[in-house]
Amino acid sequence: MKNLSLIIIICSAFIFNCNTSKTSIAQKNERLQNIKENDTVKISSDKVEYEIIIIEPGFNTWLVSTARPEGFYSQQYMETRNYQYVVEWNQRVNQPFRYNTNLYELQIDYQPNIDYGYEVNYKLYNYFIYFQLKYNQRLGSFTPRI
């Protein structure tokens, strides 16, 4: 009788553990999907026809928790820095044997004579800061700072 009850306890523990794993895998997949959705930043404007989509794990959280608040930098300051960062970024995209193609995949079409507005410049500027800090890159002669 002791052996039978021990086998039942072991089997029920095994079945219970299998069901728990399935639930935790489903929860994990759902959590990963939520993280992916929350880390996608889409910037668009009605004034001009453009769209920026940033898909970078952790960027949205960093933007909210670590970056300087909106209004800290002037639009002109961010436009100047963004243009410098974009020029360097695009040069690295065009040199795939010298720079990591996983980091520099696509060129950025940023024109200095177009007014993209404060929000676009703010998010783009902060993405460049985040990128440089996260991947230990330097896109200019100055050290990225928060």
Image (tube, grey):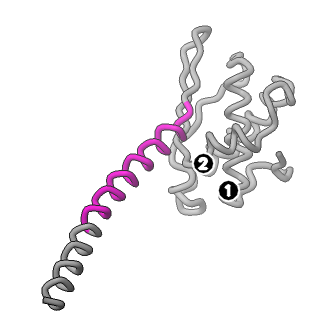
Q: Are marks 2 and 1 in contact (CB under 8 Å)?
A: yes
**Looking at the image, residue 5 lies above or below residue 101:** below
Q: Quadrant of the N terminus?
A: bottom left
Residue 103 in percent (x, y) is at: 56, 54
| Front tag of 2 and 1 | 2
Q: Quadrant of residue 14?
A: bottom left
Q: How many marks?
A: 2
Q: Quadrant of the C terminus?
A: top right
- Give residue 134's mark: 1
* Residue sitting nearer the eye, 84 or 47: 47
Asked if residue 4 lies left or right of residue 145, the reply is left
* Residue sitting nearer the eye, 96 or 106: 106
Q: Amino acid at mark 1?
A: Lys
Q: Amino acid at mark 2?
A: Gly
Would you name the residue on which mark 2 appears? 58
**Looking at the image, residue 27 lies above or below residue 109:** below
**Looking at the image, residue 104 lies above or below residue 37:** below
Q: Is residue 30 magenta?
A: yes
Q: Is residue 92 magenta?
A: no
